[in-house]
Image (cartoon, helix red, strand yellow):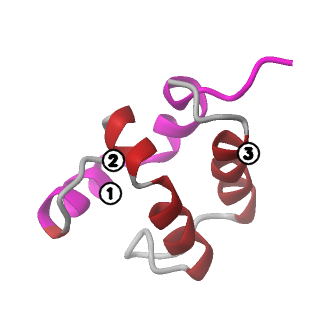
Amino acid sequence: MTPLSFAQAIRPLIRDFDIEEMKYNSSFDLSKYEDVRAHSADIYERLVDGSMPSDGAWPAENIAKFKQWMDEGMAP
């Protein structure tokens, strides 16, 4: 089984609104693989506690997909 990739499985979950908001409120870019990989643990914690995205929590299946991507080694 091929591991999930950022480009095909994770990036499509992140809306342009989320990218712009994080650029404004943080020092990283959710559209960039390198930034999401570097901050993946923090992003995951915020997804789980519902503080990200700011306008409502991700569905559980999207959070599970993000965690799976992390667990599989965070392929680009």
Q: Earlier in the sequence, mark 1 or mark 2?
A: 1
Q: How many marks?
A: 3
Q: Residue at x 66, y 40 (%)?
A: 69
> Which is the main secondary structure of the residues drawn in magenta?
helix
Where in the figure is residue 44, as x and y percent of width and height? 56, 63
Residue type indicated by callout 3: Gln
Specify the quadrant of the image occupied by residue 55. Answer: bottom left
Distance from the alpha carbon under mark 1 to that under mark 3: 21 Å
Q: Residue at x 39, y 47 (%)?
A: 38
Q: Which residue is mark 3?
A: 68
Circles 1 and 3, Cβ within 8 Å, touching? The answer is no
Going by the picture, which residue comes out furthest to the left?
24
For mark 1, does the 10 Å Cα neighbourhood hold few (<14), some (14 to 19), or many (20 or more) residues?
some
Quarter containing the N terminus:
top right
Q: Which residue is mark 2?
A: 30
Secondary structure under badge 1? helix
Residue type indicated by callout 1: Asp
For mark 2, does the 10 Å Cα neighbourhood hold few (<14), some (14 to 19), or many (20 or more) residues?
many
Q: Along the line of sight, which residue is nearer the eye, 64 or 28? A: 28
Magenta residues span 1-24
The label shown at residue 42 is: none
Q: Which residue is mark 1?
A: 18
Give the answer, above or below, for where 53 lies relative to 72: below
Q: Along the line of sight, which residue is nearer the eye, 39 or 12? A: 39
Q: Earlier in the sequence, mark 2 or mark 3?
A: 2
Distance from the alpha carbon under mark 2 to that under mark 3: 18 Å
Where in the figure is residue 11, as x and y percent of width and height? 46, 36
Circles 1 and 2, Cβ within 8 Å, touching? The answer is yes
Secondary structure under badge 3? helix
Give the answer, above or below, for where 53 lies relative to 51: above
Give the answer, above or below, for where 19 lies relative to 3: below
For mark 3, does the 10 Å Cα neighbourhood hold few (<14), some (14 to 19), or many (20 or more) residues?
some
